[in-house]
Amino acid sequence: MKIKNEPCVIEKYLEQSIDTVKHVRNSSSVLLRMTSCIAEAVSEQRTVFLCGNGGSFSMAQHFAAEMSGKFEADRSGFRAHTLGSNGATLTALSNDFGYNHVFARELTAQSKTGDVLIAMSTSGTSSNIVMALETAKDLDIKCLGFTGVGEAKFKRLCDVVFEASSERTAFVQEAHLVALHAICAKLDSVFSS
């Protein structure tokens, strides 16, 4: 298959993506509040739990790896766990309780008061993410949310929300990655000095 030499689709995509990512700068105070919540939990030897579906799940795993390992600076590893990352647990909970309960059930089993949950949903409507947030509230766990333009219920359940300035899934995910890396950079500066 030969692709026509018309770069307009690619250029338009990149232009819109860059515009969305530029808006992340407007959320620096939100990201600082999120970083403070995470830093407090890390200082108290608490766990940062993460959850998401699809691309957001991959991003949650990526952020957990940056936390447990390192971002750029050499520092101690932080306790971080992506809910649903154990295939046996994920499939057992899905089978026994239904997929809507997988993150909430695992959070109930593993978390303690003072932990943090980072919930990622580009739409803010994922029922398993909403249920995890509701459960976290019941367990007195601080809730940080990453989403796009949209659903109010998700936002109401979060203590701090980063909202990407788009409804388009790809752009929301790209903005989330930049925001998460900004948090990592700040955590590096706090814990490696």
Image (spheres, grey):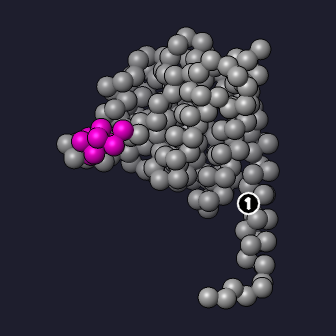
77 is higher (above) or lower (below) than 144: above
Q: Is residue 140 left or right of residue 25?
A: left
Q: Is residue 192 above or below residue 186?
A: above
Pinpoint residue 14: horizontal percent, then vertical percent. 76, 65
Q: Secondary structure at mark 1?
A: helix
Q: Which corner quadrant of the image does residue 191 belong to?
A: top right
Question: Residue placed at 78% from the left, 57% from the top?
Answer: 18
Say which residue label 1 marks: 17
- Magenta stretch: give its range: 86-94
Q: Is residue 69 magenta?
A: no
Q: Where is residue 165 drawn, in percent x and y?
A: 69, 53
Q: Quadrant of residue 129?
A: top left
Label 1: few (<14), some or many (≥20) within 10 Å?
A: some
Q: Is residue 75 visible?
A: yes
Depth check, front residue: 47 or 71 = 71
- Quarter in which the N terminus is drawn: bottom right
